[in-house]
Amino acid sequence: MTAIITPNYQITWEKLPDDYKLPDDPVDNINQPFLAAALTQSLELAGKLPTNALTPTNYGVCATLNGKTVVKAPDWAYIANIKVSREEVIRSYTPQLEGDIPVIVIEFLSDTDGSEYSSKPTYPPGKWFFYECVLKVPNYAIFEPNTGELEVYRLDQKTGRYSLQTANENQLYWLAEMNLYLGVWQGTRENRTGNWLRWWDESGQLLLWGSELVEQERQRVEQERQRAEQERQRAERLAAQLRAAGIEPQD
C-alpha cells in the first residue's frame, strides 16, 4: 500500500447529533451477519468478552473531521472498554468521548467498489484513511469469505501507516491487545459451509462456538456412558467367574 501524504486535520470527538441521518444501507451479502455473530459468540463463551466491551456490527463509529461529522460502519469491531452505558451508544459510538479506540476493525470484502481499501483523504474520507489516520485503529483486517483470503494490517507507531502482517506457521495472526490469534477456518455453522474467521488462544486452542460446546459435552456424556457400560460388563464377568468357583459375589 502506497503511503499517502495528508494535510493537517483537526480531529475532535463529538457525540453524533440527534438529527444526523445515518445511512440505512443493507449489508453487502447474506453471509456478513453470520460471520460477525460467530466472532462475538466464541469470545463470549470463552469468557473473553469483558462486561464493558463492545462488538458492534455494521454500526456507526464517529469522529468529527474539520468540523464535519464522519461515520463509518465496520462489518465488525472490538472495543475493549466503553465509558458510558450501552443505552447511550444505541445509535452510534464516538471513540475517546464514549470509550476506547477500537482494537480491531474487520471488513468483509464486498463485490462492489473496493471501499475497504479507500485511502481518500478528502471529505468524506475513505474507510482505510478513516481507520488509519483518523481513528488510528491498531489492527485492520480485510476478509474475503468466498476465497478465504485474510489480510491483517497493523498500525506502525513510527510511520503512522498500516503494514501488512505475515501469518505464523499455522496461518494465524497474533493480536497482542486481545491476547488472541485470528485466522481462517473451514467448516459449517448455521447451515453455512465455507470460510469463517475464528479466534485461537495463546496456546493455539480454538475458541469454540455454542454448537461445538454442546457437541463436545454430548461426546463427553457418551464416553462416560460407554465407560460405565464397560465397567458394568467387567463386573458381570468377574461375578460369573466367582460363581463358577463356588463363591457368591457381594454387591
Image (spheres, rainbow, N blue to C red):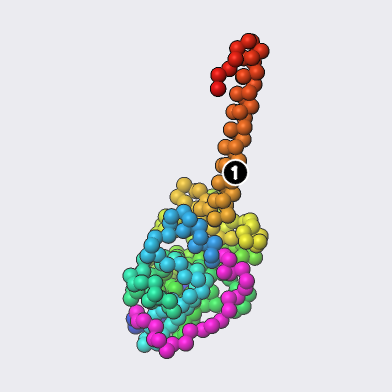
Which residue range is magenta in the image? 13-35
Residue farthest toward the bottom in the current orientation of the protein: 19
Classify 10 Å Cα crowding around label 1: few (below 14), some (14-19), many (20 and above). Answer: few
Quadrant for residue 67, please give it.
bottom left
Q: Residue at x 38, y 62 (%)?
A: 51
At which x and y percent is residue 11?
A: 35, 81
Mark 1 lies on a secondary structure that is helix
Residue farthest toward the top in the current orientation of the protein: 246
At which x and y percent is residue 221?
A: 57, 42
The answer to whether residue 182 is seen in the rendering is no
Q: Quadrant of the C terminus?
A: top right
* Vertical comparison of 227 with 130: above or below: above
The answer to whether residue 131 is seen in the rendering is yes
The foreground one among 127 and 162 is: 127
Q: For residue 162: magenta? A: no
At which x and y percent is residue 92?
A: 43, 78
Main secondary structure of the magenta stretch? loop
